[in-house]
Amino acid sequence: DRAVAMPTALVETEDIPSETVSTALRHGWAWQIPLTSRHGNGYVYSSAFVSDDEAERELRAHLGAAAEGMEARRLRMRVGRVARHWSHNCVAIGLAQGFIEPLEATALMLIQLSVEQFIGALEAGNFGPRHREAYNRRVNEMFEGVRDYV
C-alpha cells in the first residue's frame, strides 16, 4: 500500500539499459527504471510490516552511494478498481478504472482489453443496461484475474 521513490543520476559514460530491473528486498520489492537523463528508483512495501522511515533507509541502502543527497518521495497507493467501468454514457479506462501495481505492465493490457470490449459493444449497437452490466462483469473479471496473478 506504499512506495518510496527516488531518482539517481545516470552516469554519462554508462550505456542506458533497455530494461527495468526489479529486486526483492526485505519488506517488498524495488524497481530501477533507466531514463534518458536519470534512473527512476523506488521501493514498494506494506505499511503493515515496515515504517515509512525504515523503508526509505532500506531503499537508500539498496541504492548505495547513488542515493546520497537525493530527495525521497513517499507515496500511498490505493489498490483496487471501480465497481462499474461503464455507467450511463461514461466509460472509465486506465487509472480511472483501477490500479493494481506500480510497474503498470498489466495496466496496459487492461486498458487494451477494456477498449476492445467497449468498441465491440459499440459496433454491435449494444448500449442498454444489460450490455453495460455484461461489460462491467467482463472487465471486473479481468481485473480480478490480474489481481490474483500479481
Image (spheres, grey):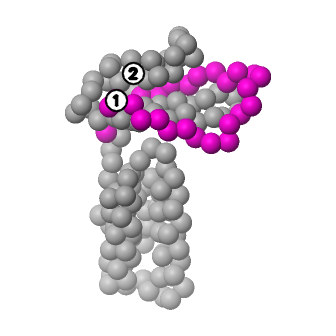
Q: Which residue is mark 2?
A: 58
Lower position in the chain sequence, tag 2 or tag 1: 1
Is 33 colored magenta in this rendering?
no
Q: Is residue 79 above or below residue 63?
A: below
Residue at the (50%, 38%) spot, across then down: 22
- Disc ID at residue 26: 1
| Quarter in which the N terminus is drawn | top left
Indicate left or right for 145 with 30 as reference.
left
Q: Which residues are magenta?
A: 1-27
Q: Residue furthest top?
A: 69
Is residue 76 among the parts visible in the rendering?
no
Q: Residues within 10 Å of mark 2 (few under 14, many from 20)?
A: some
Q: Quadrant of residue 59?
A: top left
The picture places residue 111, in percent across and down from the top left corner, at 50, 62
Residue 130 quadrant: bottom left
Amino acid at the residue labelled 1: Arg
In this rendering, the answer to whether 88 lies above or below 103 is below
Identity of the residue drawn at 35% across and 80% down:
134
Find residue 126 and name its label: none
Residue contact between numbered discs 2 and 1, judged by CB atoms under 8 Å:
yes
- Residue at the far left: name it: 48
Specify whether 20 is left or right of 73.
right
Find numbered disc 1 in the image and state the secondary structure of the residue it sits on.
Answer: loop
Foreground residue, 48 or 71? Answer: 48
Measured as percent of width and height from the top left, residue 91 is found at 44, 67
Q: Is residue 54 visible?
A: yes
Query: Residue placed at 58% from the left, 40% from the top?
Result: 20
Image spot of residue 4 (x, y percent): 42, 28
Closer-to-camera residue (55/94): 55
Extreme-right residue of the structure: 13
Report the amino acid beneath label 2. Answer: Glu
Q: Cα distance, mark 2 to mark 1? A: 8 Å
